[in-house]
Structure formats: structure tokens, C-alpha cells
Amino acid sequence: MSTCQASPHVPTNSSGFQKASTPELQITSDDEEAAIWAKMAKCKQHKALREEAAQLEAERLKREQEQEQLEAERREQEHLEAKRKEQEWLEAEHWEQETQAQQKTGELKGKEREKAARVARLSVMHFWPCTAKCELPEGVEPEAEEAGAKAGKKRVPEDVMLLRAREKRKVTRVGSAIPGESEASPLGVVVPTVPPSDPLVAVVVKGFKLIAAAMDQQMAEMWARRETQHWFNSWLGDLLGEFEFVLRPTTPVSKSSEELHSDVADMELESLQSD
């Protein structure tokens, strides 16, 4: 009994298709097969072109997104910068308004202080000019004062002079017999605590209070400057003493090399003589 062993067939075509060896077994012709291969190559080429176009489109979309993101960040930064500048402008305008208001307030206070000081000086000189419209006491007509002012004469009725003199003595008096009637400042100026009926006297009292407060402040500042100067002088003296101790000259204790050699030679000579 004979056995027949078949050997495996190894195809020589690299495409994986085996070409029929005989015309009877061949399904398609050579031209059709070439057309099929050309069509397959064309499909592969189209597929590669589509993939390349899709990749380019994806890269373009990515670049557009990055550009839009950068544009949004730039707009946000410009918005924040404009908001910051507007806030700084509002703060500068508010600060300027506050500065102008403080300057106006300081000017008004300075004018009031000068007016009070001027009235106080005039009260000390026993001179009472009426420079503002005030309430007149009973029995005094405003026409008389207006006529006197127009004529260039400062005339005051006798009862008004007596009333103001009494108020003046009450203001400049040191000490009071009635408790609570007046209070004394640290400089000894006594001013009434009860508000007077005459507006001019009220202005004088206010002027005295301002003058006393200013003098008290000057005295406090003077004492503070004296204490600071005393402390500085003491500290400077201690510092100069320390520097004097550090910079005090000292006597040299070291000897030169020549002196040391001479001392050694003398010692050797003495030892030889003793031997």
C-alpha cells in the first residue's frame, strides 16, 4: 500500500491572491485584474487624502480655538485694566474733593479764630465795635446805630455800655463766688459756663477759650520738646563716654625682632660667662 504525501503550496504572489495556472480556472482576465488593482490603489490614495484633510482640519480648528482663547484673555485683561483705571480716577477725584473740603474747613476755622482773637483784643482795649447785625436790647432803636455808622461815629447807648462792662468784669474776674458760674483754664483765664444773652459776649468768651486752648497746647509742646532734648543729651553723653573708652590710646607692649635678637644674644653671653 503506497501512501501519497502532499507538500504545502507556497504562493509566490505578494498580494495574497493566487493566479490561476490554466485559462480554464482563471475567472477574470489580466486587464480586469489590473483595473481592480488600479481601483484599489486609487481608493487607498483617496483614503490617505481624506485622512490628511481631516488632520489639517483638526489642526486648523485647534489653532482657531487657541486664537479665540487668547483673544478672550486679552479682552478680559483690557476690561480689568479699564476698571482699575476708573477706580483710580474715582479715588483721585474723591481724595481731591476731601482735600478741598478740608482746606475750606481749615480756612473757615482760621477766619473764626482770627475774628475771635481780634474781638478779644478789642475787648481788652475797652473798645466794642458792632460789626454784625445782632439782637439789640430793649429801648434801643436800630435807626440810631445806623445813623451813627453812616456818620462814621461809633456811639453806643449808656445802658448797653453798662451791660457790657458788667459782662466784661464777670469774664475777666479770677475766681467766682457762685459754684458752677465760671470755670478757669490752666492759665488762670476764667470764662462763664452759662451762655450769655449778648451775642458779642458769646464771641468774646469763645475767643478766650480758643486762646487758652492754644496757649495750653504750646506749653505742652514746649515741655515735650524739653524732655526730648534732655533725653537726647543724656543719650549723647553716654555714647561719647563709650567712644572715649574705646578710642583711648594704649601703650605698645610688643617688641621688634631686633630687640628680641639682642636679648637672646645677651642671655647666651651671660650663660657663657657663668660657665
Image: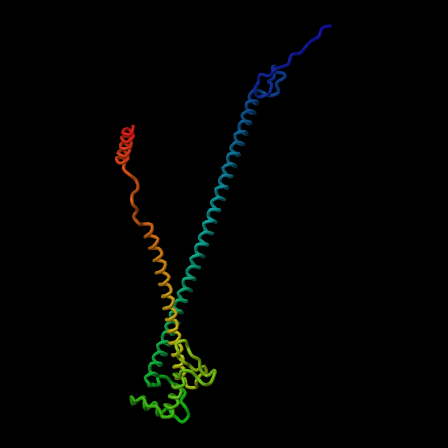
Q: In the image, residue 217 lies at what x, y percent?
A: 39, 71
Task: Pick whichever, 137 or 34, lies toward us.
Answer: 137
Position of residue 70 relative to residue 92, above or below, is above
Image quarter where the N terminus lies is: top right
Task: Answer left or right for 132 relative to 263.
Answer: right
Residue at image point 40% right, 94% down: 139
Task: Pick whichever, 34 or 130, lies toward us.
Answer: 130
What is the quadrant of residue 38 in the picture? top right
Q: In the image, residue 42 lies at what x, y percent?
A: 53, 28
Task: Answer left or right for 137 relative to 22.
Answer: left
Position of residue 268 relative to residue 222, above or below, is above
Task: Pick whichever, 37 or 102, lies toward us.
Answer: 102
What is the quadrant of residue 224 in the picture? bottom left
Q: In the image, residue 179 lies at what x, y percent?
A: 47, 83
Q: In the image, residue 40 lies at what x, y percent?
A: 55, 27
| Residue with the most extreme front position | 274
Position of residue 241 relative to residue 66, above or below, is below
